[in-house]
Every structure is written in C-alpha cells, then in structure tokens.
Amino acid sequence: MHVRTKGILGGQNLKRFDKLRSFLLTKLKIIFNIYTAFIVLVLISTLLSEHFLTRVNIFNVLRQASALGILSVGMTFVILSGNGGVDLSVGTLMSLTTVLTAGIMMGNPDMILQSLIVVVAAGAMVGLFNGIMITRFKTDPFITTLGTMTVVQGLAMFYTKGAPFGSVTNEFRVIAQGYFGVVPVPVVIFLTVFVVSLLVLRKTVFGRYVYAVGGNQEASRLSGIKHNRIKIAVYVISSMMAVLAGLIMVARVSVGDPRLGYGFELNAIAATIIGGTSFAGGVGGMSGTIVGVMIIAIMDNLLNLLNVSPFLHEVVQGLIVIGAIIMQRKK
Amino acid sequence: MLEMKGIKKRFPGVYALDDVTFRVKKGDIHALVGGNGAGKSTLMKILSGAIEPDDGSIFVDGKKVIINTPEAARKLGIAIIYQELDLVPTFNAVQNVFLGCELRNKAGLLDETAMINEVRDLFNKLELKVPLNEPVGKFRVAQRQMIEIAKALHQNTEILVMDEPTASLTDHDVEILFDIVMRLKEKGVTIIYISHRLEEIYRICDTVTVLRDGKIIGTEDVKKLTHQELIKMMINRDISQVFPETKCTAGVEALRVENLTVKGVLNNINIRVCAGEVVGIAGLVGSGRTELLRAIYGADPIENGSVYVEGKKVGIQTPSCAIKCGIGFVPEDRKDHGIILRLPVKENITLACLPMIAKPGIINEQKERNLAKELTGKLKVKFSDLSQLVSSLSGGNQQKVVLAKWLATKAKILIFDEPTRGIDVGSKNEIYHLLRELAKEGLAVIMVSSDLEEVLGLSDRIYVMCNGEITGELSGKGACQEKVLSLAMGAVV
C-alpha cells in the first residue's frame, strides 16, 4: 500500500486525519439514533413552520399517525418472527374493512354489531390463511401475503363495483371524531394497542417466543417451542390490527373506500424498519416502531405545511428508510 | 518468517489480545494452543484480515505489511480455515472451491469444465469421496470441512492457518489430513495449527505457542515439552487425571428404546439407559448416532418403534413431547441448534421452561434471574452479565448455557451429541466432571462422541453403532479402543 508522505495528507497528517475520522464516526453513531433524529425533526419542524406546534396540528398529526401506528404494531410482530416474515396484505385488508363496515351498516345503527362481526371474521380468516400457508405449506411470506393482498383488493373492488360506497352512522363516527377528555379517540386506541403490545413482547411467554423464533427457529423448535403456532398467531395479530385501523379510517371518512389502504403496508414496514426492528427477525421491538411511525407522520405533516408537492413526500420517506438502515448497520 | 508484534485488541469489556508478539519460523508446523477465550481465534482473524487490531504490526519475511481485508491476506499468501465453516450451502463443491477466483474461458464466461477438472484432481489427491454436483449444505460437517481445506490449498498459500481442523473429523479423516499437512510442509508451506488435541500437536507439530487470557505464555519446541508441562502452561493448574472416576450408580430404568427403525437410516435399534448411568454411543461418521439421538428426542419423526420413559410407553413426535417426558437434547451444532445467539444468557437458559416461571403467561423476571444465577453458578459459566448476549460467550461457556437450559426444565434424561466439540482442555474437563455429577445426582446421560478416549473414559456402558445398527454393547470395563473400533467398522468381535 502506497502511503503519501508529502502534502497535507502526508505522513503524520494522514494518521491524525484517520484518527479524527474514526473518532467522529463513533461519536456520530452514538448520537445519531432514531430518538435523537425524532427530536431533531420536531425542532426543525417547529422552526420551519409556525403552524407546527399548534394544538390543531399536533392532534392532526397524531390522528394521521394512529392508523399507520396500529398497522405498524402488527407488522412489528410479523417482522420480529423472522424467517422472511412480512405481511403485505394489511393495506388492502384495511380497505376491505372500510368497505364491508360501511356497506353493511349503511347508516343504520342496528347494523353496527353485524358489520363488526363480519370484518373481524374476515380479518381472522385472512390472518389464519396467511399463517397456515406460511407454516404448514412453507410458502414464502412475501409472495403469500402479496397474493392475499391482491385477492383482498379484488374482493373490495368487487363489493363496491370500484367506487367508494356505503355509509357509517354518527354513533360510529365517534371512533374517529370523539375525544377521551382532551385526547382524540383514535390516539387513545393507538396508544393502548401500543402499550399492550409492548408489554406482551417484553413480559409474556408469547412475546419471548416471538423473539426466539425470529432469532433462531430451529433452536427454538428443539427447545420445545411450537414455532408454527407462534407464526400463525403473529399473522392473525397483524390482520386484526389491519381491521382495527380500517375501523378507525371508515369512522373518519364515513364511507367505505376500496382504495384507501393501498400503500399503507409499505409505510408500516418502513416505520418498523426505521424503528430498528431487523428484517431478519429476532431484534428490535415496539419502542422503536412508535418512533418510526412518528417520524413518518411528522415528516409528512411538515412537508404538507411547507406546501411541498405530495409526490415528493414519498421521495423523502424513501430516503429516511435508507438512512435508517445505514445507521443500523452492525459494525 | 511471520511476526505479529505488539498486537492489542479490545472487545467491549474484554482485552482479547494484550500486547501479543507471535513469531513463526518458515516451513514450521506451529501449534497455537490455549483455553477458550485465550485469544487464538482473534489473533488468527487479525492475521487473515477478518478484523483489524487496535494496535501492533505484522511483518512477513521481514517486511511490514498491512492486512486490513481478507483479500490483502490472500495476496500475501495467507489463508485460513475457520472453525465455523465458510461455505455457501447452496453451491456445490466446485463452486465453493473456486469461490471468488472463478475460471473464465476466452469468451469471458465461466469455464465450468476446467473448474470441474481441477477440483476433481484436487479431490483425488486428497482422497475425498464427496460428490461434486450437490449443494454442500446437505453434507455432514466432516465433508464440508474437507472442502474448506481443499479450497484453501487451491489458492497456493504460503501460510496456512487451521483453526481446529479436526474437531469434527473421524480418526480416518484425521489421518488423511495429516498426510496432506506433511505434504504441504515438504512443499515449504508454513502452517499455524490451532487445536485442542494434544496427540495431534505432539504428532505433527514442531513448535508450540501457548496463549492464555490474551497473553503469550511461552513458545517452545514440542519435543522439549512434556504433556503435563504443556497442559500446565495452558490452564495454570495441574490436570493429572483427564477423566473423573466412573463409579456407576445405576438405578431404575429411565429410558428404553425398542425396535426403532427409520427407513434407510436406523434399523431395529434397542437400547436401555438407567438413572445414574452414563451411556456412550460410539461409531464412525455416518453410523447413525446423531440420527438415533434426534429420533429419541423427537427432532426427527419415528416411523417404527417404541420409546419407554421410566417404564411407561410414550409417543414422542416433537421436541416438546420429549421435554414433557423429561428429556433434554444438547445438539452437536450448538450455534445453530442449541442457543439463540441474539438473546441474552438468562433468556437462553429459560427458553425451554418458560411456562414454569410464568403464571399466567407473564414472565416472572425475578424467578428468571434467580434461576439463571443458580444454574450459571452451578455450571461455572464465565460471563459478565446475565443480560449479555450469549453470542459473546466462548464455545465452552455456550455449551454450558445449553446444558443449563435443560437443567432448568428438571430433565431426567440428558442426551449429548458431541458434548465437547470445539472446546478447550480446561472446559472439557469441567464438562466431564459435570456429566458424571449429573449421573451421580440420578440423571440418565446418553452421550455420542467421535473421540474414542472420551467415550471410553466417561461411559459406564457403550453401544457401538455401524450403518444404522447396534453392532455391540460393551461394559465400561470390558471396552478398549480396538474393540470399539472394530465393532464400529462392522467387524465381528
């Protein structure tokens, strides 16, 4: 290896430069995690827009984040279970939920219960289908849930003949527009789901088994863990989350929209990954995911406040994801 | 010819290498020995460019060199064969040997024929009977290791580092390896040989360097050092007796297997193990020992045959059934099958018994910590914190964690597949004592080992397998290496 000995980068200076660079990099790695990124983002947003820290706006952001947040909680379970785990069907399942809820309810309060039963059953079926295909038939999760996603989308379109359809009662709209004290209902639902999931992952046997199966499925199997059951369970959880998110959405827009959820699944994956959950499984968790969700929601909000073209939002989001995985590289 | 001077390397909380100066003479077969965690693998990883030292320099033939990538090491003629095998499981033998240095024809495309021919020649020279066309992921550990050696030899190395090359080889394969090593020496290749096996070191090595706790203890001509002196240097305490006394305390029958058959693999196996016994299962690679253990444990499905635990017939179709019957399985491949690397020590220990410390479904963290503390204390596991990831423990300590996992389930029957593979003399000794202690406490211990001395030294009774069948049953006293080996090779004794 040829070491230059003259000039600014020569000899001793090269050594010093190298040392300075590695020092800076280590310090940067410590400082530069998602929690500080989040704080920086909030600060920047406050500076760039006077509307950011207003009550209206904050609640707006939180409301927007709720549906995505709930989806991401489900997605975190699935990705944690490793072995290629991912659920691409949550977005379209969300749409189907809105469509079925609005379509069955049709503004009639007596039909609320019926519509709920149907969507919960539909969600359970999709989750079970995904889980059983992936475990018993050992199909690839990405392709399987891609297939489910397409089927569900088709069903939603078929039911509504392609256009937004149906209606939701005022009593039901409380879910989206009501308040628990000062906090909007969707936010309460999201935070409850988040906290419960956090506790489940950290403190329960089931949660531990999710990490185990994601970390090493074979070692888990040989330790007596019923890995197939765990995997089916996480897919059912993910689908149930999609249904819950769909209910919140339909309560907000009060019609069923077969295209509503399209693309949400990618955002949910992005939030989970930004939050530090490894795509390989076994590493990560809820505390990171919520930060990932907030980063995406705040960034979106900021770009809106700054009147940036909506098309560029996706560019920014993609860059955030890439930045996040670069930061998460193992040494 | 090679000098590594003043090497320092620090990992979080630990000095892996503390000012190490290591010199090797050209053409020597130089043994590098030391306990688990002594720093041998780290030192060699630095030499081969896999990691960089925090301080120190390397000189090859008197010239200072910088080895910051494996590529740089390769260019200097340094090759290393790791303990953890580095092959691509979906590639076949040819593709693996040529990995990174594929041959191209004049059109710039892969020259399959030339590569196949070269590999065939190489394998013939090495007397390797390994199919060239099948993905190596399916091969047994021994076969994959031979491909690794062929791959390193193929790259015309001048300094070849072998990290525990014989850990998974049978005596027969080891002889072949020794032939190759001697031939390499004649060609002038310098070999650095990391091994735990004293007989090997004394047989083929010229010089030996001892590392302990990241420091060089000494370098000496092998001929000038007795076994005792060498062991003493390695562990700083005298080991006069490798194997603990086998006082058989056999009690009631704990496990009985009748007419166990798995098509093409196991044929009509009948074995019995009593509480308080250590039963060894000996045989050569491919005799079906691991398959037998896995079948008993439920890791693989049983087609025909019955298993009786404490006299009662049980149906063991999955590992969780086996665990409910009080059986624990310490597998051959602990990193892939025994522990979950990215989980902490205490979570690995409770992995198989969580329902016992979680009511109702919520883990009692205090109980978990206590259990982990108790067991790591009993087994003398070396670690700094219960929440430390188990991936940062040395091989011997990881093995103890696997054992702790089963003790936590209060297993009454323990099955060990190669219990001391890749573990240093000091830790091996501890594990031997542990096995006998467990038997004394009333557990039934079944052990498979390719190390005849180990099987003979530890077992009260030995079953010998060959080609999927039991060819003989010997009591501890009536057994000797020749008898076991002949039974293992199918001869009538």
Image (tube, coloured by chain):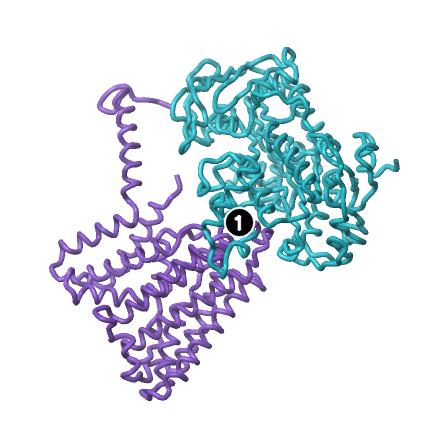
Chain colours: A purple, B cyan
Judge from the rendering whether residue A82 lies leftward or rightward of residue B471; answer left or right: left
Q: How many marks?
A: 1
For residue A290, which quarter of the picture?
A: bottom left
Judge from the rendering whether residue B64 lies leftward or rightward of residue B123; answer left or right: left
* Front one among A125 and B368: B368
- Relative vertical location of residue B218 with respect to residue A316 in this rendering, above or below: above
- Taking the spot 25% from the left edge, 63% from the top edge, the residue there is A311
**Mark 1 belongs to chain:** B
On the question of residue B451 being in view, the answer is yes
Outermost residue on the top side: it is B224
- Taking the spot 39% from the left edge, 76% from the top edge, the residue there is A96
Judge from the rendering whether residue B360 lies leftward or rightward of residue B91; answer left or right: left
- Relative vertical location of residue B161 with respect to residue B336 in this rendering, above or below: above
Element marked by disc 1: loop
Find residue B206 and report its horizontal and vertical position in percent.
62, 15
For residue B5, which quarter of the picture?
A: top left
Find residue B260 and report its horizontal and vertical position in percent.
78, 53
* Front one among B176 and B284: B284
Disc 1: CA contacts within 10 A as few (<14), some (14-19) or many (>=20):
many
Amino acid under disc 1: Thr
- Relative vertical location of residue B370 with respect to residue A89 in this rendering, above or below: above
- Relative vertical location of residue A231 with respect to residue B57 in this rendering, above or below: below
* Front one among A163 and B485: B485
Locate the C terminus of chain B by quadrant. Answer: top right
Find residue B121 and report its horizontal and vertical position in percent.
67, 32
- Taking the spot 60% from the left edge, 45% from the top edge, the residue there is B407
Find residue B31 and report its horizontal and vertical position in percent.
59, 21
Pointer 1: what residue? B350
Outermost residue on the right side: it is B492
On the question of residue B337 being in view, the answer is no
